[in-house]
Amino acid sequence: MSLQNIIPTIVVGYDPDKVPLNSTSTTPYAPRLAMPPMSIRPYHIVYHPSLLQDMMDSLREYLQTAPGANDPPDPYLTLQINEVSTPQSHANSPLSNKVSTTETWTNHFAVIKRCVREIDQNPTYPQTSASTTIYGQTPDLIVHSIRDGPARIHREDKSHSVFSTHAPNVLRMARAVDEQGALIGTRLRMADVERDHWSIIFKIGLSMISGAIPYAILFGGDRFMVFSLFMDPNTIGAPRYGLYCSDIVKVSNVSTPFIPLVTFMLLGRDTPALLSSKSEIPVCLDSPVLQSEAVVTRGPKKRYSMDNNLTMTKFVRFFLSW
């Protein structure tokens, strides 16, 4: 069988055991010296219900014409696929702290990087780079399509207990609805100190926007979320960007499997593989009234409410495409 047939069907064949942990806190985000400029702050987060399926459909489309699509996988990749697909995999280790999450990613990435190189027939494997601190925040990892190539993925690792605590709150914000039940997501205004799921959102968003990184993964070892960017087409002045986010999905999911999804994010040597969406996704237009450098103060229990600014928000239907 060819890579075109095999790659979309690679599924992680196990759900790792989890060691109970008491810690559920994540590091706060407090910008040092100066607040990030408005142009690199995410201004909105909204749920994209078909994001992962759109990525799988786009992967299949890309594989129809990819340079190596009709080639069979090399013998070592075949062994890797067979290994990751079985519950007896050597990588099926219990999840505990964040270090174990990172080790799990490393095991899966060994398959992903070989898939990418064979599909695109690149001269090098995808490469991870040393993280650069951005306004006091250092990403866990940035992944590039090839050595010295463009950044494609911001990866944010969390222990399974931290992920279980905060990822559902990120999704809850993204799935907020208005009084009529229409999906609107949540407007974001940056505080002097961000905590909990707010910290995660701003860390991911600032890194993606400032680095022109099209995708981010919040990774918990056995589950994950994917983020992508959208641009407000009605912004006055510098462009403003918001975040789309996916559902929370198990790494062993069959319909939108983890390894093919991450492979897709890294395809395209110079420009990302085209992501096409057949769904109409709401994009919140950033009202000029709200385009301010002002910072809100947010304590550990106090959260910014978007109730007062909903009347100043307009929504349009926008087809996501890259």
Image: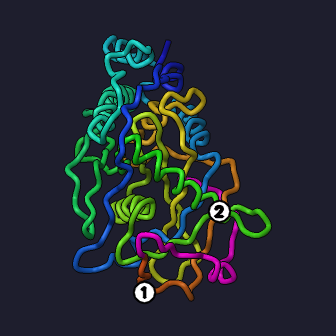
Q: Three-letter amino acid code at disc 1?
A: Ala
Mark 2 element type = loop
Mark 1 element type = loop
Q: Quadrant of residue 101 in the image?
A: top left
Q: Position of residue 244 (x, y in %)?
A: 55, 57
Q: Which residues are magenta?
A: 299-322
Q: Position of residue 165 (x, y in %)?
A: 46, 50
Q: Residues within 10 Å of mark 2 (few under 14, many from 20)?
A: some
Q: Position of residue 220 (x, y in %)?
A: 41, 41
Q: Three-letter amino acid code at disc 2?
A: Ala
In this view, the residue in front, 295 or 164, is 164
Q: Residues within 10 Å of mark 1 (few under 14, many from 20)?
A: few
38 in magenta: no
Q: Which residue is mark 2?
A: 176
In the image: residue 127, left or right of residue 314: left
**Residue at image point 26% right, 40% down:** 127
Q: Which residue is mark 1?
A: 294
**What is the image's colouring?**
rainbow
Q: Earlier in the sequence, mark 2 or mark 1?
A: 2
